[in-house]
Image (tube, rainbow, N blue to C red):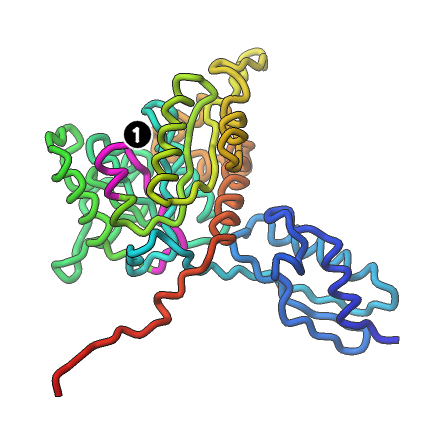
């Protein structure tokens, strides 16, 4: 007796994608199911990058199908297909960029830029094409964190080619000015610079562009909300009450301007003494999770207060690339997959499919 497609579907309903928390039928990941007698082949198409766990997903599906009575050969092919998702109404997508993820915090000093660069590197480690845009005009830090020096070039005299660091396409005002030159600019000049850096960079086929925002809820954030096609925002905070007060303001700002909150990352959550291993909650405990509960948003993950994160990032070699097998890199990849899943769950953007209508006198 041959295996039926219904049996295969029922089996797939009984196993859950560890990243989406949905079964493979409900999540619409199972595609191209083919049955030849007792042999089964199918594709699992993920809407998010998952290079480091593809083997585990393939094994999970294979083992379940092999448990069916009378089953023969099982062939499971796991692939990723990342598409553009909807943004604020009336804002056009940037050429060469499918999705923009804003990384924000209400106040400075919570590790937002460190989180942004490691999130971008983690998305790339999972197989996505990723760029990072340093939107902190007054205090650009991504050139240092990515270990990039030099000036961007232009092939056509109109658009700048992005700089490359650890496989990321990167752009920052820090590439265009001397490292010790202060940006003594008023708000309108800053917002104009942000728009130029975004729109006059020749981004190449990016699945995700991570935008590292300056702290606060001022001109740059409002420009981003009104003129930049943002798919969603990640809020970075520490467990400390002072940081959480400002993080809540940042979250409410994005809600007001119609940008979805992807979730919250709690940085400096726990300190482990490098000498004795003693664990201490230096900045308090559970603040990020309480904030998530209050606003019904997802807690994406917590990162330790670890001297290695600071040392490696300051040296232009962040933990995700400096120690890819370490626990910190693993946490960042878990956060990155969850961010990508949340993006994939949003409505798709189909504007690229519609032709431009041109009216001419004939």
Residue 298 counted in the magenta span: no
Task: Tell me the quadrant of the picture where the N terminus can be found.
Answer: bottom right
The residue nearer to you, when weighing 14 against 222, is: 222
- Magenta segment includes 210: yes
Q: How many tags in the picture? A: 1
In the rendered view, does 93 fall on the left or right side of 361? right
In the rendered image, residue 109, in percent from the top left (x then y), is placed at 34, 23
What residue is shown at x 25% (from left), y 75% (from top)? 357
Q: Which residue is mark 1?
A: 215
**Residue occupying the point 34% across, 30% down:** 315
Can see residue 359?
yes
Q: Report the side of 97 relative to 4 (left or right).
A: left
- Residue at the image position 28 percent from the left and 32 percent from the top: 217
Query: Is residue 300 visible to us here?
Result: no
Q: Residue at x 19, y 40 (%)?
A: 173
Q: Residue furthest bottom?
A: 362
The magenta region covers 205-223
Q: Is residue 358 left or right of residue 100?
A: left
What x and y, as percent, mark residue 144?
Answer: 29, 34
Q: Position of residue 245 (x, y in %)?
A: 39, 22
Image quarter where the C terminus lies is: bottom left
Instruction: State the residue in front, 156 or 259.
Output: 259
**Vertical placement of 22 versus 297: above or below?**
below
Q: Nearer the viewer, residue 242 or 114?
A: 242
Q: Can you tell which quarter of the image residue 182 is in?
A: top left
Q: Secondary structure at mark 1?
A: loop
Q: Position of residue 156 (x, y in %)?
A: 15, 62
Residue 61 located left or right of residue 251: right
Q: Height in image: 87 above or below 121?
A: below
The quadrant in which residue 185 appears is top left
81 w.r.t. 239: above or below: below
């Amino acid at each position: 007796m041959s295996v039926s497609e219904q049996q295969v579907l029922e089996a797939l309903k009984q196993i859950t994608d560890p990243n989406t928390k949905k079964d493979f039928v409900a999540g619409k990941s199972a595609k191209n199911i083919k049955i030849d007698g007792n042999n089964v082949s199918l594709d699992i198409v993920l809407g998010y990058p998952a290079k480091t766990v593809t083997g585990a997903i393939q094994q999970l599906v294979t083992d379940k199908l092999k448990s069916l009575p009378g089953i023969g050969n099982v062939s499971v092919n796991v692939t990723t297909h990342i598409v553009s998702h909807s943004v604020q109404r009336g804002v056009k997508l940037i050429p060469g960029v499918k999705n923009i993820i804003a990384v924000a915090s209400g106040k400075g000093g919570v590790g937002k830029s460190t989180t942004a660069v490691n999130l971008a590197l983690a998305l790339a480690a999972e197989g996505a094409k990723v760029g990072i845009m340093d939107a902190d005009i007054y205090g650009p830090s991504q050139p240092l964190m990515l270990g990039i020096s030099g000036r961007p070039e232009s092939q056509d005299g109109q658009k700048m080619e992005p700089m490359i660091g650890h496989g990321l396409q990167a752009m920052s005002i820090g590439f265009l000015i001397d490292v010790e030159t202060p940006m003594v600019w008023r708000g309108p000049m800053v917002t104009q610079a942000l728009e130029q850096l975004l729109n006059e960079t020749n981004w190449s086929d990016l699945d995700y562009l991570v935008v590292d925002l300056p702290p606060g809820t001022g001109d740059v954030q409002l420009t981003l909300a009104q003129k930049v096609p943002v798919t969603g925002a990640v809020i970075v905070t520490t467990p400390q009450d002072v940081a959480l007060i400002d993080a809540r303001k940042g979250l409410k700002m994005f809600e007001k301007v119609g940008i979805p909150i992807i979730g919250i990352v709690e940085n400096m959550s726990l300190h482990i003494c490098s000498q004795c291993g003693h664990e201490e909650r230096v900045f308090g405990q559970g603040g990020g999770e309480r904030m998530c509960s209050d606003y019904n948003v997802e807690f994406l993950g917590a990162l330790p207060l670890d001297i290695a994160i600071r040392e490696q990032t300051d040296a232009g070699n962040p933990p995700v690339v400096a120690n890819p097998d370490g626990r910190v890199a693993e946490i960042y990849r878990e956060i990155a997959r969850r961010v990508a899943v949340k993006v994939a769950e949003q409505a798709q953007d189909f504007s690229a499919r519609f032709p431009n209508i041109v009216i001419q006198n004939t």
